[in-house]
Image (cartoon, rainbow, N blue to C red):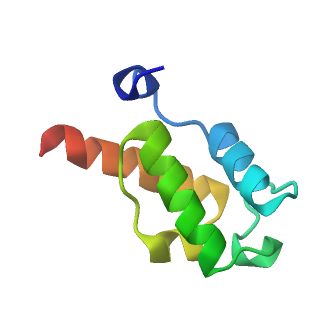
Amino acid sequence: MSVLDAFAHPVDVADIRALVADVLDTDVPGDGSFIGHGGDSFHAVVIVARIEERWGVEVDFLDVLDSTPDSLAAAVNKAHGAQAQG
């Protein structure tokens, strides 16, 4: 799947939950905090890299640390919108 195909539809929270769950090796509900589920700065760097690889956008490292899957999906979609306009 190309980056353009990935954004034919907004990033779904389920996709973000799966990504975070894979990195943290635990189930994470949509409203579960990144740090509350064992995330740390190393995990945040991995998630930033995987988001850029999969969706072709950059999200702020601190946004990942302070995120829930819901808020991280919103940040990825916002970054894509800014990239498309910019």
| Residue 10 horizontal side relative to residue 66, left or right | left
Where in the figure is residue 54, as x and y percent of width and height?
49, 38
The picture quadrant where one finds residue 12 is: top right
Total tally of numbered discs in the picture: 0
Residue 29, quarter of picture: bottom right
Image height of 36 relative to 9, above or below: below
Of 39 and 14, nearer the camera is: 39
Q: What residue appears at the point 44 percent right and 56 percent down from the top-left corner? A: 75
Taking 76 as reference, is 55 above or below it? Answer: above
Which of the pair 4/71 is nearer the observer? 4
Query: Residue most toward the right?
Result: 26
Tell me what residue is drawn at x 54 percent, y 50 percent: 50
Residue that sits furthest to the left in the current view: 86
Q: Is residue 3 above or below residue 20?
A: above
Q: Nearer the viewer, residue 46 or 66?
A: 46
Residue 2 falls left or right of residue 28: left
Residue 44 seen: yes
Residue displayed at 22% across by 45% down: 83
- Percent x, y for residue 22? 77, 50
| Apparent side of residue 11 relative to residue 68 in the rendered image (left or right) | left
Q: Residue at x 63, y 46 (%)?
A: 16
Q: Is residue 50 above or below residue 42?
A: above
Q: Is residue 73 left or right of residue 52?
A: right
Indicate the position of residue 66 as horizontal and vertical percent values. Answer: 57, 76
Q: Residue 41's x, y, as percent? A: 60, 80
- Residue 30 in view in this figure: no
